[in-house]
Image (cartoon, rainbow, N blue to C red):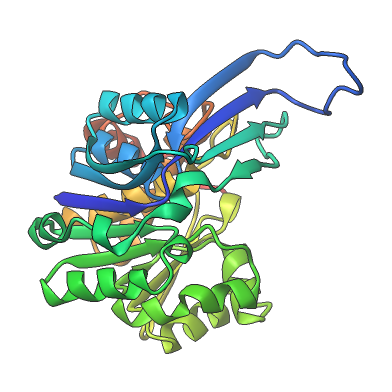
Amino acid sequence: MRVVALGAHVLDTLVRPVEQIPSGQSGELVEQIKMTAAGPAGGTAVVLSRLGAAVQSAGAVGTDALGDLLLALLAREGVDTSLLVRRDGVQTSGSVLPIRPDGSRPAFHVIGANGSYELEDVPWDAIAAATHLHVGGPEFLGEMAVKVLSYARDHGVTTSVDSLAPADPGFFELFAPVLPFVDYLLPNDEQVLGWTGTDDLVTGCQALLARGAGCVVATAGADGAVVVAGDLIEAVPAFAVDVVDTTGCGDAFSAGFLRALSLGYDARDAASFGCATAAQVAGGLGSDAGNYDLDSVLAFVASDPTPVG
Protein backbone atom coordinates (compact mmCIF):
# COMPACT_ATOMS: atom_id res chain seq x y z
CA MET A 1 0.00 0.00 0.00
CA ARG A 2 1.50 3.33 -1.13
CA VAL A 3 -0.24 6.31 0.46
CA VAL A 4 -0.04 10.06 0.08
CA ALA A 5 -1.52 11.65 3.23
CA LEU A 6 -2.24 15.21 2.14
CA GLY A 7 -3.58 18.07 4.21
CA ALA A 8 -3.56 19.07 7.86
CA HIS A 9 -0.43 18.22 9.83
CA VAL A 10 -0.49 19.40 13.44
CA LEU A 11 1.90 19.32 16.38
CA ASP A 12 -0.14 18.40 19.47
CA THR A 13 0.94 19.26 23.00
CA LEU A 14 -0.98 17.09 25.46
CA VAL A 15 -1.21 17.46 29.24
CA ARG A 16 -2.83 14.97 31.59
CA PRO A 17 -4.76 14.74 33.77
CA VAL A 18 -6.41 18.17 33.82
CA GLU A 19 -9.63 18.68 35.78
CA GLN A 20 -9.51 22.48 35.74
CA ILE A 21 -7.28 25.31 34.55
CA PRO A 22 -5.43 26.82 37.57
CA SER A 23 -6.60 30.32 38.44
CA GLY A 24 -4.43 33.42 38.20
CA GLN A 25 -0.70 32.67 38.29
CA SER A 26 -1.03 29.43 40.22
CA GLY A 27 0.18 26.10 38.89
CA GLU A 28 -0.64 22.43 39.18
CA LEU A 29 1.45 19.27 38.90
CA VAL A 30 0.39 16.76 36.27
CA GLU A 31 1.49 13.23 35.40
CA GLN A 32 2.47 13.67 31.78
CA ILE A 33 3.17 16.24 29.06
CA LYS A 34 3.80 14.98 25.54
CA MET A 35 4.17 16.34 21.98
CA THR A 36 3.00 14.28 19.00
CA ALA A 37 2.55 14.41 15.23
CA ALA A 38 -1.17 14.70 14.67
CA GLY A 39 -3.95 16.03 12.45
CA PRO A 40 -6.24 14.16 10.05
CA ALA A 41 -3.36 13.83 7.59
CA GLY A 42 -0.37 13.70 9.96
CA GLY A 43 -1.90 11.44 12.60
CA THR A 44 -3.29 9.06 9.99
CA ALA A 45 0.11 8.95 8.29
CA VAL A 46 1.78 7.87 11.54
CA VAL A 47 -0.61 4.99 12.16
CA LEU A 48 -0.62 3.84 8.52
CA SER A 49 3.17 3.65 8.66
CA ARG A 50 3.03 1.61 11.86
CA LEU A 51 0.64 -0.76 10.09
CA GLY A 52 3.13 -1.37 7.30
CA ALA A 53 2.03 1.06 4.59
CA ALA A 54 4.53 3.17 2.66
CA VAL A 55 3.45 6.72 3.51
CA GLN A 56 4.36 10.14 2.17
CA SER A 57 3.08 13.21 3.99
CA ALA A 58 2.12 16.24 1.88
CA GLY A 59 1.17 19.60 3.31
CA ALA A 60 2.69 22.77 4.72
CA VAL A 61 4.57 23.44 7.96
CA GLY A 62 6.47 26.47 9.19
CA THR A 63 10.23 26.93 9.28
CA ASP A 64 9.92 27.31 13.06
CA ALA A 65 11.04 24.95 15.81
CA LEU A 66 7.55 23.44 15.91
CA GLY A 67 7.93 22.46 12.27
CA ASP A 68 11.36 20.95 12.92
CA LEU A 69 9.91 18.82 15.69
CA LEU A 70 6.85 17.80 13.69
CA LEU A 71 8.99 16.59 10.80
CA ALA A 72 11.29 14.72 13.17
CA LEU A 73 8.37 12.96 14.85
CA LEU A 74 6.92 11.92 11.49
CA ALA A 75 10.28 10.68 10.25
CA ARG A 76 10.81 8.69 13.45
CA GLU A 77 7.63 6.79 12.62
CA GLY A 78 8.89 5.98 9.12
CA VAL A 79 6.82 8.60 7.28
CA ASP A 80 8.45 10.18 4.20
CA THR A 81 8.35 13.94 4.83
CA SER A 82 9.95 15.07 1.57
CA LEU A 83 6.64 16.33 0.17
CA LEU A 84 5.99 18.68 3.10
CA VAL A 85 6.73 22.29 2.12
CA ARG A 86 8.20 24.76 4.63
CA ARG A 87 6.69 28.23 4.99
CA ASP A 88 8.56 31.30 6.22
CA GLY A 89 6.64 33.79 8.32
CA VAL A 90 3.86 31.46 9.42
CA GLN A 91 3.91 29.10 12.36
CA THR A 92 3.42 25.37 12.16
CA SER A 93 -0.12 24.34 13.01
CA GLY A 94 -0.43 23.37 16.67
CA SER A 95 -2.89 22.34 19.34
CA VAL A 96 -2.78 22.30 23.13
CA LEU A 97 -4.96 19.57 24.61
CA PRO A 98 -5.71 19.36 28.36
CA ILE A 99 -6.79 15.76 28.83
CA ARG A 100 -9.48 15.12 31.43
CA PRO A 101 -9.32 12.03 33.67
CA ASP A 102 -12.00 10.32 31.52
CA GLY A 103 -9.90 10.76 28.37
CA SER A 104 -11.96 13.56 26.83
CA ARG A 105 -10.49 16.98 26.14
CA PRO A 106 -11.11 20.50 24.89
CA ALA A 107 -8.65 21.95 22.37
CA PHE A 108 -6.79 25.18 21.74
CA HIS A 109 -5.75 25.32 18.08
CA VAL A 110 -3.73 27.44 15.65
CA ILE A 111 -4.40 26.78 11.94
CA GLY A 112 -1.00 28.19 10.96
CA ALA A 113 0.72 26.78 7.88
CA ASN A 114 -2.13 24.39 7.12
CA GLY A 115 -4.01 27.36 5.72
CA SER A 116 -1.16 28.30 3.37
CA TYR A 117 -1.05 25.20 1.12
CA GLU A 118 -1.31 26.12 -2.57
CA LEU A 119 -2.03 24.34 -5.84
CA GLU A 120 1.61 24.67 -6.90
CA ASP A 121 2.60 22.67 -3.80
CA VAL A 122 0.59 19.58 -4.78
CA PRO A 123 2.83 16.56 -5.60
CA TRP A 124 0.93 15.39 -8.69
CA ASP A 125 3.43 12.72 -9.70
CA ALA A 126 3.50 11.20 -6.22
CA ILE A 127 -0.29 11.07 -6.13
CA ALA A 128 -0.45 9.37 -9.53
CA ALA A 129 2.12 6.79 -8.36
CA ALA A 130 0.25 6.02 -5.12
CA THR A 131 -2.39 3.37 -4.55
CA HIS A 132 -4.25 5.61 -2.10
CA LEU A 133 -4.74 9.33 -1.48
CA HIS A 134 -5.98 10.33 1.95
CA VAL A 135 -6.97 13.98 2.30
CA GLY A 136 -7.17 15.21 5.88
CA GLY A 137 -8.88 18.56 6.30
CA PRO A 138 -10.19 19.32 2.78
CA GLU A 139 -11.78 22.50 4.13
CA PHE A 140 -8.27 24.03 4.34
CA LEU A 141 -7.67 23.34 0.65
CA GLY A 142 -10.75 25.12 -0.73
CA GLU A 143 -11.45 24.54 -4.43
CA MET A 144 -8.04 22.86 -4.71
CA ALA A 145 -9.45 19.78 -2.93
CA VAL A 146 -11.72 18.96 -5.88
CA LYS A 147 -8.80 19.23 -8.32
CA VAL A 148 -6.59 16.99 -6.19
CA LEU A 149 -9.20 14.30 -5.57
CA SER A 150 -10.48 14.27 -9.16
CA TYR A 151 -6.88 13.97 -10.39
CA ALA A 152 -6.37 10.96 -8.11
CA ARG A 153 -9.56 9.37 -9.38
CA ASP A 154 -8.51 9.93 -13.01
CA HIS A 155 -5.27 8.05 -12.26
CA GLY A 156 -6.97 5.06 -10.63
CA VAL A 157 -6.00 6.03 -7.07
CA THR A 158 -8.41 5.15 -4.25
CA THR A 159 -9.46 8.24 -2.29
CA SER A 160 -10.54 8.92 1.28
CA VAL A 161 -11.35 12.10 3.21
CA ASP A 162 -11.44 13.01 6.90
CA SER A 163 -12.44 16.52 7.97
CA LEU A 164 -11.77 18.79 10.93
CA ALA A 165 -14.82 20.91 10.08
CA PRO A 166 -17.25 21.43 12.98
CA ALA A 167 -20.70 19.86 12.95
CA ASP A 168 -22.30 22.78 11.14
CA PRO A 169 -24.03 22.77 7.72
CA GLY A 170 -22.29 25.99 6.71
CA PHE A 171 -18.82 24.53 7.21
CA PHE A 172 -19.90 21.34 5.46
CA GLU A 173 -20.79 23.25 2.31
CA LEU A 174 -17.19 24.47 2.12
CA PHE A 175 -15.98 21.01 1.12
CA ALA A 176 -19.16 19.20 0.01
CA PRO A 177 -18.15 19.60 -3.68
CA VAL A 178 -15.38 17.01 -3.12
CA LEU A 179 -17.81 14.21 -2.26
CA PRO A 180 -18.33 12.89 -5.82
CA PHE A 181 -14.58 12.20 -5.91
CA VAL A 182 -14.37 10.45 -2.52
CA ASP A 183 -14.42 6.66 -2.29
CA TYR A 184 -14.46 6.63 1.52
CA LEU A 185 -15.69 9.51 3.69
CA LEU A 186 -14.57 9.11 7.32
CA PRO A 187 -16.43 11.56 9.61
CA ASN A 188 -17.50 11.19 13.22
CA ASP A 189 -21.11 10.91 14.34
CA GLU A 190 -21.37 14.53 15.51
CA GLN A 191 -20.20 15.77 12.13
CA VAL A 192 -22.66 13.59 10.23
CA LEU A 193 -25.63 14.72 12.32
CA GLY A 194 -24.61 18.38 12.27
CA TRP A 195 -23.78 18.51 8.56
CA THR A 196 -27.03 16.87 7.50
CA GLY A 197 -29.39 18.28 10.13
CA THR A 198 -30.74 14.86 11.10
CA ASP A 199 -30.91 13.06 14.44
CA ASP A 200 -30.30 9.59 12.99
CA LEU A 201 -26.76 8.52 12.10
CA VAL A 202 -27.67 6.11 9.29
CA THR A 203 -30.02 8.65 7.71
CA GLY A 204 -27.27 11.23 7.89
CA CYS A 205 -24.76 8.88 6.25
CA GLN A 206 -27.26 8.17 3.48
CA ALA A 207 -27.65 11.91 2.91
CA LEU A 208 -23.88 12.14 2.42
CA LEU A 209 -24.03 9.26 -0.06
CA ALA A 210 -26.68 11.20 -1.94
CA ARG A 211 -24.22 14.08 -2.23
CA GLY A 212 -21.76 11.78 -4.01
CA ALA A 213 -19.60 9.90 -1.49
CA GLY A 214 -18.99 6.27 -2.40
CA CYS A 215 -19.03 4.91 1.16
CA VAL A 216 -19.51 6.67 4.50
CA VAL A 217 -17.89 5.19 7.60
CA ALA A 218 -18.85 7.20 10.67
CA THR A 219 -17.12 6.69 14.00
CA ALA A 220 -19.14 6.98 17.19
CA GLY A 221 -16.67 6.71 20.07
CA ALA A 222 -17.54 3.92 22.47
CA ASP A 223 -20.41 2.94 20.16
CA GLY A 224 -17.98 1.87 17.45
CA ALA A 225 -18.74 2.78 13.85
CA VAL A 226 -21.43 2.63 11.19
CA VAL A 227 -20.69 1.65 7.58
CA VAL A 228 -23.16 2.83 4.94
CA ALA A 229 -22.76 2.25 1.20
CA GLY A 230 -25.65 1.60 -1.18
CA ASP A 231 -27.80 -1.08 0.44
CA LEU A 232 -25.09 -1.89 2.99
CA ILE A 233 -25.75 -0.72 6.55
CA GLU A 234 -23.46 -2.24 9.19
CA ALA A 235 -23.02 -1.28 12.84
CA VAL A 236 -19.57 -2.28 14.11
CA PRO A 237 -18.89 -2.34 17.87
CA ALA A 238 -15.88 -0.79 19.53
CA PHE A 239 -13.60 -2.83 21.78
CA ALA A 240 -13.54 -2.46 25.56
CA VAL A 241 -10.31 -0.78 26.69
CA ASP A 242 -9.22 1.38 29.59
CA VAL A 243 -9.31 4.82 27.99
CA VAL A 244 -6.49 7.22 28.81
CA ASP A 245 -6.97 9.73 25.99
CA THR A 246 -9.28 9.85 22.96
CA THR A 247 -6.92 12.11 20.97
CA GLY A 248 -6.00 10.50 17.66
CA CYS A 249 -8.53 7.68 17.91
CA GLY A 250 -10.37 8.91 14.82
CA ASP A 251 -7.12 9.08 12.85
CA ALA A 252 -6.16 5.62 14.09
CA PHE A 253 -9.55 4.27 13.03
CA SER A 254 -9.13 5.79 9.56
CA ALA A 255 -5.65 4.30 9.20
CA GLY A 256 -6.75 0.86 10.38
CA PHE A 257 -9.80 0.89 8.13
CA LEU A 258 -7.83 1.92 5.05
CA ARG A 259 -4.99 -0.52 5.72
CA ALA A 260 -7.47 -3.37 6.12
CA LEU A 261 -9.11 -2.48 2.81
CA SER A 262 -5.70 -2.69 1.15
CA LEU A 263 -5.35 -6.22 2.56
CA GLY A 264 -8.61 -7.31 0.95
CA TYR A 265 -11.02 -6.88 3.87
CA ASP A 266 -14.59 -5.91 3.06
CA ALA A 267 -15.87 -2.60 4.46
CA ARG A 268 -17.50 -4.15 7.54
CA ASP A 269 -14.44 -6.13 8.60
CA ALA A 270 -12.18 -3.19 7.74
CA ALA A 271 -14.23 -1.02 10.11
CA SER A 272 -13.77 -3.62 12.85
CA PHE A 273 -10.02 -3.53 12.22
CA GLY A 274 -10.22 0.25 12.43
CA CYS A 275 -11.90 -0.03 15.83
CA ALA A 276 -9.17 -2.44 16.95
CA THR A 277 -6.49 0.03 15.86
CA ALA A 278 -8.21 2.89 17.67
CA ALA A 279 -8.29 0.74 20.80
CA GLN A 280 -4.48 0.57 20.77
CA VAL A 281 -4.25 4.37 20.75
CA ALA A 282 -6.98 5.03 23.35
CA GLY A 283 -4.92 3.29 26.01
CA GLY A 284 -2.18 5.93 25.98
CA LEU A 285 -1.53 9.62 25.50
CA GLY A 286 -1.61 11.17 22.02
CA SER A 287 -2.06 10.01 18.46
CA ASP A 288 1.18 7.98 18.56
CA ALA A 289 0.27 6.13 21.76
CA GLY A 290 0.72 2.40 22.02
CA ASN A 291 3.34 -0.09 20.90
CA TYR A 292 1.75 -1.95 18.00
CA ASP A 293 2.19 -2.95 14.39
CA LEU A 294 0.10 -4.78 11.81
CA ASP A 295 0.79 -8.21 13.28
CA SER A 296 -0.08 -7.19 16.84
CA VAL A 297 -3.37 -5.59 15.78
CA LEU A 298 -4.22 -8.70 13.77
CA ALA A 299 -3.44 -10.77 16.88
CA PHE A 300 -5.60 -8.45 19.00
CA VAL A 301 -8.57 -9.02 16.67
CA ALA A 302 -7.92 -12.77 16.54
CA SER A 303 -7.95 -12.94 20.35
CA ASP A 304 -11.66 -12.09 20.17
CA PRO A 305 -11.52 -9.12 22.56
CA THR A 306 -14.71 -8.04 24.26
CA PRO A 307 -16.72 -5.56 22.20
CA VAL A 308 -18.45 -2.66 23.93
CA GLY A 309 -22.18 -3.17 24.33
Relative to 283, 194 lies left or right: right
Relative to 96, 6 lies left or right: left
**Looking at the picture, how far across and down is residue 242, in whole percent?**
58, 30
Q: Quadrant of residue 133?
A: bottom left
The residue depicted at 41 percent of the width and 43 percent of the height is: 9
The residue depicted at 56 percent of the width and 82 percent of the height is: 203
The residue depicted at 44 percent of the width and 28 percent of the height is: 64
In this view, the residue farthest toward the right is 24
> Residue 283 versus residue 251: which sits nearer the camera?
251
Q: Quadrant of residue 74?
A: top left
**Is residue 133 placed above or below 253 in the rendered structure?**
below
Q: Is residue 276 visible?
A: no
- How many numbered marks appear? 0
> Residue 140 versus residue 183: which sits nearer the camera?
140
Q: Is residue 283 visible?
A: yes
**Looking at the picture, how far across and down is residue 121, in whole percent?**
26, 55
**Looking at the picture, how far across and down is residue 108, in whole percent?**
67, 40
**Looking at the picture, how far across and down is residue 293, in whole percent?**
27, 31
